[in-house]
Image: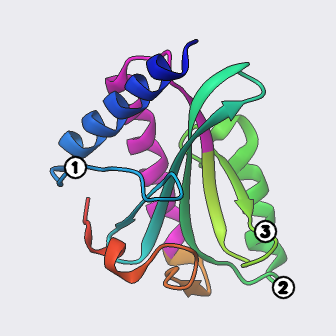
């Protein structure tokens, strides 16, 4: 896939996502990442990259949910079960970031798919994030890598 074609597909995905959310244009920052917030307490990071399992360009999407209590074995077990067959992860993968301790749902979106299909997957991930956030000890990710000014978008 040519780099320009991948960039066009990435831009098409961002355009479809912005339209679905009813917000202004989503565009990468200087570092190449697209940053915005959901519900004023969860952050989203989208960047273009290559997904090794796809073998081609992808949009790498991460939804930062909040901090789980790492001593709550029951919750951690439920998070693991939520990953099984993507039962409670919205087709993404639930993980806890090693550096920040933030629960994240992430997925490599195949840019060869139709933008509307990618928006549907994103919506599933948001639904899963909304399911998990109230169950976390420290909901919200104000210090999780998404600037406060980017947290204003509500979907």
Q: Around disc 2, counting alpha carbons within 10 Å, would you say few (fewer than 14), some (14 to 19), or many (20 or more)?
A: few
Rendered-image quadrant of the C terminus = bottom left
Q: Secondary structure at mark 3?
A: helix
Residue 77: mark in rendering: none
Residues at discs 3 and 1 in contact (Cβ within 8 Å): no
- Numbered disc in front, either 2 or 1: 1
Per the image, the residue denoted by label 3 is 76
Q: Judge whether 80 appears above or below 135 on screen.
A: above
Per the image, the residue denoted by label 2 is 71
- Give the Cα separation between the discs numbered 3 and 1: 36 Å
Residues at discs 3 and 2 in contact (Cβ within 8 Å): no
N-terminal of the pair, mark 2 or mark 1, is 1
- Give the Cα separation between the discs numbered 2 and 1: 40 Å
Per the image, the residue denoted by label 1 is 25
Report the residue at 58% width, 12% height from top: 1
- Give the Cα separation between the discs numbered 3 and 2: 8 Å
Residues at discs 2 and 1 in contact (Cβ within 8 Å): no
Question: Residue at the top extreme?
Answer: 1
Report the residue at 49% width, 76% height from top: 134
Q: Position of residue 67 (x, y in %)?
A: 65, 80
Label the magenta part by its dominant secondary structure: helix
The span shown in magenta is 107-133
Q: Position of residue 152 (x, y in %)?
A: 27, 74
Report the residue at 30% width, 50% height from top: 26
Q: Secondary structure at mark 2?
A: loop
The tally of labels here is 3
Q: Around disc 1, counting alpha carbons within 10 Å, would you say few (fewer than 14), some (14 to 19), or many (20 or more)?
A: few
Q: Judge whether 60 appears above or below 5 on screen.
A: below
Q: Is residue 127 magenta?
A: yes
Q: Position of residue 140 (x, y in %)?
A: 49, 81
N-terminal of the pair, mark 3 or mark 2, is 2
Decide if residue 122 is on the left or right side of residue 136: left
């Amino acid at each position: 896939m040519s780099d320009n074609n991948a960039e066009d597909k990435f831009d098409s995905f961002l355009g479809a996502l912005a339209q679905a959310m009813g917000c202004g244009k989503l565009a990468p920052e200087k570092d190449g990442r697209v940053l915005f917030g959901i519900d004023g307490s969860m952050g989203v990071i989208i960047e273009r990259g290559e997904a090794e399992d796809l073998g081609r360009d992808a949009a790498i999407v991460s939804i930062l949910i909040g901090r789980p209590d790492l001593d709550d074995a029951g919750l951690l077990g439920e998070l693991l079960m939520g990953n099984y067959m993507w039962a409670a992860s919205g087709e993404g993968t639930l993980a806890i970031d090693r550096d920040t301790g933030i629960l994240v749902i992430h997925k490599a979106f195949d840019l060869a798919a139709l933008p509307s299909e990618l928006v549907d997957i994103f919506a599933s991930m948001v639904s899963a994030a909304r399911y998990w956030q109230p169950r976390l000890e420290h909901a919200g990710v104000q210090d999780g890598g998404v600037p406060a000014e980017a947290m204003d978008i509500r979907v």
